[in-house]
Image (spheres, rainbow, N blue to C red):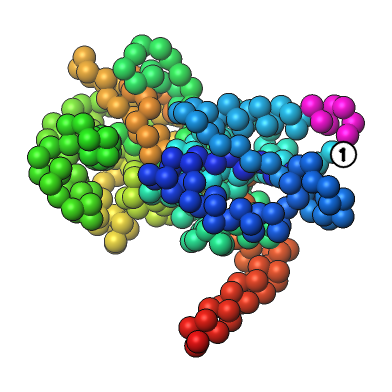
Amino acid sequence: MAKIRHVCFIVNPTSNNGQGARVWESIEQAVNHYFAAVGSQDEAAVQERATFEVFFTEHAGHATELATQAYQSWQQGQREGSRIPDQLLMVAVGGDGTVHEVVQGLEAHREQVVFGVIPAGTGNNIARSLRLRDTARALRTLVYGTALPLGAYKIEACERGSCQKKTVLAVNEFDLGVTTQVKKRENDYQSGERAGRLMSFSPGSRVYSLSDFTSAMRWNTPMVKCSIDGGSRFHIPLNIMAGGATGPTIGGEFGFLYGERAESKRGELLYGEKWDPPLWTLAQVAMQRLLNWSGLKRAQFTQLDIEHVKETPQDIQVDGDILLQTPARIIWLPEVFRFLRPPVFGDHGYHGMYLEEAEDERAKERQDSI
């Protein structure tokens, strides 16, 4: 059986206002416990453990460059006949955007590359879908976890603000409509640009609720033209249109695609068939989340084509960032990536992870009793 013998950590130190750097500092010692640093003089450790190296991103898109270079170096080692790792574990330390960047361009190497996530973002939707509830569990999953095949959306569209075509893979979600407007408002608040007087003077805990409300009030619900799996085209008002890949939580922190499974053979789409007031659309999103029911329509597809009806292209949010705009073609790719998830009873590694977590609980109880 193939075995992971080398690990690359790609850390986004600026994720979530510096949380990425703080998370790496908190796990660095444990990483050295589980893995052996490249170039280590401890030969016994190198023989027993997988080796690791760490890279830090410096700008947008840098994680993709680092991941590609790391994979190429790993392949070069194979060709040179040196100590060959059977599989490469690529770990994103950051938020959904960091994970998104790391996987780009590596879809053709699904048998060789396994992905891991150490959550350090704001939404951490991909980590939630993988049931990585905290940093400690996420780190141990790199040692004891089980590889889970995940689908992704291949999105061919115009780059935002230009006519240049671009292809990206959405490993967690894509969405258009009022949820994208919410994201734009949140970005304005975080950057300090055009945040609005009400949001500028509001406490941080209320910003996102205010963002939802003000975005809904300003959303004008344009029309778009769609086609599913090459069928006839139909017009719908763009209240919301969203698809999820790895799990139920998409569109920032909205969770409204319950029923989506990682092994799905077709992509999942949620949209509104008729025009609704924007605030009612957000209410339907909440109903879908809480009750798994609303007036929104669900459909499955392998190919989705979207065009804007009027002159203004519509923004597309991909894995939590607004990257593209219509017209777009979205193709579902089943089981294109493998991500490590925590082991469940019966999995190899379950016993080791259970023992370590149980020891953590005992240590916490001893500390609390002092």
Q: In which quarter of the image is residue 347?
A: bottom right
State left or right for residue 6 relative to residue 268: right
Residue 4 is situated, as x and y percent measured from the top left of the image, at 75, 47
Q: Can residue 239 be seen in this view?
A: no
With respect to residue 134, does 241 lie above or below? above
Closer to us: 119 or 351: 119
Residue placed furthest toward the top: 163
Tag 1's secondary structure? Answer: loop
In this view, the residue farthest toward the right is: 81
Residue at horizontal 64 percent and vertical 41 percent from the top: 54
Give the percent coordinates (x, y) of residue 96: 45, 42
Q: As rendered, which of 67 and 290 lies closer to the eye?
A: 67
Q: Is residue 160 above or below residue 144?
A: above
| Residue 144 spot, x, y in % from top left | 68, 60
Q: Mark 1 points at which residue?
A: 83
Q: Position of residue 316 (x, y in %)?
A: 34, 29
Picture residue at 48% right of the left edge, 46% below the top: 20
Image side of residue 203 versus residue 230, left or right: left
Q: Looking at the image, which residue is at 38% across and 27% down? A: 323
What is the count of numbered marks?
A: 1
Which portion, as a residue range, is magenta?
76-83
Q: In this view, does 29 lie above or below 162?
A: below
Q: Can residue 127 be seen in this view?
A: yes
Judge from the rendering whether residue 59 lies leftward or rightward of residue 239; answer left or right.
right
